[in-house]
Amino acid sequence: MTSATQGLPAFDYAARRKQVLDEIGDGIAVFRAPPLAVHANDVEYRYRPKSNFFYLTGYGEPDAVAVLDGSADKERFILFVPPRDPERETWTGPRAGVEGAVDQFGADAAYPIEQLSEQLIPRITHAGALHYRFGHDEVFNHRLLDMAKRAWASRPRTANDRPTSLIDSGPLVYEMRLKKSDAELAWLRRAIDIAADAHIAAQRETRPGQSEYEVEALVEYSFRRRGASGWAYPSIVAGGANATVLHYIANDDPLRDGELLLIDAGCEVGYYCADITRTFPIGDDFSPAQRQIYDLVLASQEAACDAVRPGVTVDAIHDRAVEVLVDGLLRLGLVPGSDVAQALGSEEYKKFYMHRTSHWLGMDVHDVGAYNVDGAPRPLEPGMVLTVEPGLYFAPRLEGIPQEYQGIGIRIEDDVLVTDDGADILTQAVPKRPDDILNLRGR
Ligand code: GLY
Ligand code: MN
Ligand code: MN
């Protein structure tokens, strides 16, 4: 960790592992940290651990496997890791190795990663169930299935009454990650604090004639200079009509006077993510049409933020945001209908607001955790963190839309913690009211 992250609380990885072990009974759970990804030829990407793996181990090196074996008496937490290798370490830096896996990371036993199959297959044989999340790691998906096949086929006939269940470990860990502890919130607040500063710097410094990439560079410089590991997702720095492309990340167009700039950018600290969007004028002020749409998105965003409290659902927050948007669109004559109910029913608004209002936020920017439980939207609980991010997007040459609205894309996104009696808007340091924005820009 960098100096900027020192002083933040450590996580109790052993308590997290105990919770998983308590849940899986005599099952065995397997988590994999993939090898380094190749950028080109022998150039590799900087490594970012998989969130579940790091959440349970605190071990951040590539090419490892963590096993929680509920059927074992002694070796219940086993790490398979790259062994020490002085020659390789000259190139890539020190490794914890097998010894470090035990001494520093608390494994009951550790083995070189090369011994995975020979060590894991007998353990799967004895386990009541195999817990594993089939994700994007195709190589390991196949490898583990092959190990399971061999384990189950090797059981003696006299023991073939053992279950051979394969259980998705995702939901178990995802539920744990959904509600944030005080220690996790301290890291998340740190990421948000740094990202907020980056947005403030961008609002202050942006001028007509600059390029999107200059603002992108300022934002990401602001992340790194305070010790964040970098962006939590590729920054969206979208001037003018580029803001109507939801996942615009090219960031290479000039910034023009009279247009708006949408910045959706957040950094990562200790593997916790900030996710903030603001939209502001590149020049001196909003045009009347821009201001109409901005005020509408802001009203929707503030109403949705006001709705966040324990017991409310993410669906209800979305409905509140949409209700305000549709009411405004109707008044501006941008959607048909005789009243809000009819305009909502026709769903014409989805041409301009086509995404959801909220997602969970944590170690992953689109964090894990079920949105529905037992077939119904889940009520929010204290400790959950979600985004609130309505927007309106009028693509250029959109049929039936007056010219002055075409090419306007506006989103406002805050990160919100559900508290015991309401909500804490963690990103409130970044101006979003027009007067505050113009004030910050010296206008
Ligand atoms: N930046 C990704 C999102 O807002 O969901
Ligand atoms: Mn978001
Ligand atoms: Mn975002």
Image: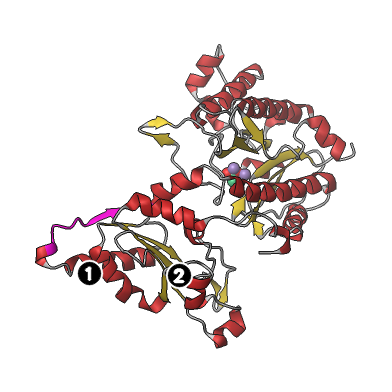
In this view, the residue farthest toward the bottom is 87
Q: Position of residue 206 (x, y in %)?
A: 82, 47
Q: Which residues are magenta?
A: 159-169
Residue 157 among those drawn in magenta: no
Tell me what residue is drawn at x 62 percent, y 54 percent: 232
Where is the C terminus found, in terms of image quarters?
A: top right
Q: Quadrant of ligand 1?
A: top right
Viewer-proximal residue among 99 and 86: 99
Q: Residues within 10 Å of mark 1 (few under 14, many from 20)?
A: some
| Residue 103 visible at all | yes
| Corner quadrant of residue 120 | bottom left
Tell me what residue is drawn at x 47 percent, y 77 percent: 98
Q: Position of residue 182 (x, y in %)?
A: 60, 45
Residue 162 among those drawn in magenta: yes
In this view, the residue farthest toward the top is 338
Three-letter code for the amino acid on which mark 2 is drawn: Ala
In this view, the residue farthest toward the right is 442
Residue located beneath label 2 in the image: 64
Q: Secondary structure at mark 2?
A: strand
The numbered mark, 2 or 1, whose residue comes first in the sequence reads 2
Q: Secondary structure at mark 1?
A: helix
Question: On the rendered structure, is 313 left or right of 436?
Answer: left
